[in-house]
Image (cartoon, helix red, strand yellow):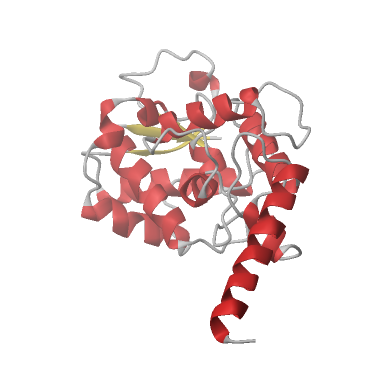
């Protein structure tokens, strides 16, 4: 058998595997690499454990109201699309690599264990820049520290992206500040916060008393004041 014929047979067999997997609801990645731990790409019609993980994460963030059944139907697609829009990434309803990273489900994503990917660091810098633009450097690090303190706290999601995109947690993800260039100081502040500097005094909340109308927030015990922000627990 010559090389050309062998290549044709391989192509036909691969196509058959993928087609058969599609009939069972698997992604092509699942069919060819079943058993690996990396996340693949889920879209409308997909089924399996990855879809379940996506649904659980979206549900914890308030984007998904349906059953966690591992079936990527219309509700899941709409929830993914809404999440993507809130992040400012391509809103195609497909849980691809970028979306999975933003959800904290990517293979390199960090969690409460203290290991953070470059994507996590960039995301933390982005929220620091949007939330603490104009604050002192210490104040910027403190905002980053609050976010990290939430990751470690049992009352909040256990991933960086989960905390940042938790519904209603940070208004900046839905306003024009989110799309401004990330300040260099915010990038440094993100690294300093991840490396353990916590000027907030262990706070898990902060607010600007001149801007907030949240009565509940004002009842929290203030542990530190840095610039325009009150840091509290």
Q: Is 207 positioned to the left or the right of 162 in the image?
A: left
- In the image, residue 12 sits, relative to residue 200, either above or below, namely below
Q: How many marks?
A: 0
Q: In the image, residue 112 lies at what x, y percent?
A: 62, 54
Between 106 and 225, the residue placed more toward the observer is: 106
- In the image, residue 223 sits, relative to residue 14, either above or below, namely above
Between 155 and 42, the residue placed more toward the observer is: 42
Look at the image and tell me whether residue 155 can be seen.
no
Q: In the image, residue 18 lies at what x, y percent?
A: 67, 55
What's the residue at 38%, 61% (across, down)? 191
> Which corner quadrant of the image does residue 74 belong to?
top right
- In the image, residue 56 sits, relative to residue 33, either above or below, namely above
What's the residue at 74%, 43% (across, down)? 23
Look at the image and tell me whether residue 29 can be seen.
yes
What's the residue at 24%, 54% (across, down)? 185
Q: In the image, residue 157 lies at what x, y percent?
A: 63, 40
Q: Is 196 positioned to the left or the right of 5 in the image?
A: left
Between 182 and 220, the residue placed more toward the observer is: 182
Q: Quadrant of the C terminus?
A: top right
Specify the farthest residue to the bottom. Answer: 2
What's the residue at 56%, 85% (across, down)? 3
Q: Quadrant of the N terminus?
A: bottom right
- In the image, residue 11 sits, relative to residue 130, either above or below, namely below
Q: Is 127 positioned to the left or the right of 155 in the image?
A: left
């Amino acid at each position: 058998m010559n090389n050309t014929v062998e290549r044709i047979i391989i192509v036909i067999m691969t196509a058959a595997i993928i087609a058969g997997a599609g009939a069972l609801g698997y992604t092509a990645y699942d069919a060819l690499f079943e058993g690996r731990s990396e996340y693949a790409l889920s879209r409308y019609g997909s089924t399996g454990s990855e879809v379940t993980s996506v649904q659980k994460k979206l549900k914890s963030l308030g984007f998904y109201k349906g059953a966690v059944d591992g079936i990527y139907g219309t509700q899941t697609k709409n929830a993914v699309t809404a999440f993507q829009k809130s992040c400012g990434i391509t809103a195609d309803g497909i849980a691809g690599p970028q979306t999975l990273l933003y959800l904290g489900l990517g293979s390199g994503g960090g969690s409460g264990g203290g290991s953070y990917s470059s994507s996590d660091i960039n995301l933390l810098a982005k929220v620091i820049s949007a939330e603490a633009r104009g604050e002192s450097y210490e104040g910027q690090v403190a905002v980053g520290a609050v976010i990290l303190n939430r990751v470690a706290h049992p009352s909040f999601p256990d991933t960086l992206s989960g905390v940042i995109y938790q519904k209603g947690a940070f208004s900046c993800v839905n306003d024009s500040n989110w799309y401004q260039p990330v300040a260099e100081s915010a990038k440094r502040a993100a690294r300093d916060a991840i490396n353990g500097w916590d000027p907030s005094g262990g706070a898990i909340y902060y607010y600007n008393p001149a801007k907030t109308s949240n009565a509940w927030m004002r009842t929290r015990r203030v542990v530190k004041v840095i610039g325009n922000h009150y840091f509290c627990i």
